[in-house]
Amino acid sequence: MKLVLVTFLFVSLVLSSFFFEESMAGYCAYKCKARCSKAEFKERCMKSCTICCQKCSCVPSAVTENKHECYCYRDMKNYKGLSKCP
């Protein structure tokens, strides 16, 4: 009985994490597309924004401002010490 319950819980956890990742990918694509809409290098902006979004689970609302809405996004730095997230 306990083995069945543990197995069920494990399978539920694995499936829920899969659906969370899928929904997060859609969220990041949607939010980053809006944030990078006026960027000069859209592909580079989308790549950086998507990486930041997946790590932080948020993207600031405005095109260039409002980084205070997502501290993780704001504070992420690249190897040069500059802001990684657009």
Image (tube, rainbow, N blue to C red):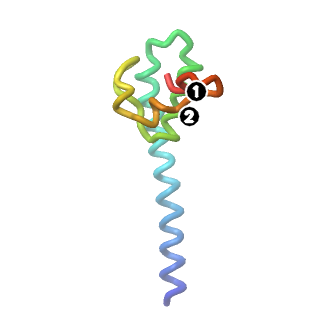
Residue 62, placed above or below residue 29: above
**Closest to the observer, 29 or 81:** 81
Residue at 53 percent across and 24 percent down: it is 83
Name the kind of residue labelled 1 in the image. Answer: Lys
Of residues 47 and 81, which is closer to you in this image? Answer: 81
Helix, strand or loop at label 1? It is helix
Element on which disc 2 rests: helix
Q: Residues within 10 Å of mark 1 (few under 14, many from 20)?
A: some
In-front residue for pair 70/50: 70
Residue under numbered circle 1: 47
Extreme-bottom residue of the structure: 1
Asked if marks 2 and 1 touch (Cβ < 8 Å), the reply is yes
In whole angstroms, how far apart are the C-alphas of marks 2 and 1? 6 Å
Give the amino acid at mark 2: Ile
The residue at 50%/87% (across/down) is: 2
Expressed as whole percent of the image width and height from the top left, the position of residue 33 reads 45, 24
What label sits on residue 51 in the rendered view? 2
Count up the numbered dots.
2
Residue 1 pos. (x, y %): 49, 90
| Rendered location of residue 75, percent (x, y) | 48, 32
Residue at screen point 44% across, 16% down: 37
The image shows residue 62 at horizontal and vertical percentages of 35, 21
Number of residues whose C-alpha sits closer than 10 Å to that of mark 2, classed few (under 14), some (14–19) or many (20 or more): some
Residue beneath the point at 47% across and 59% down: 16
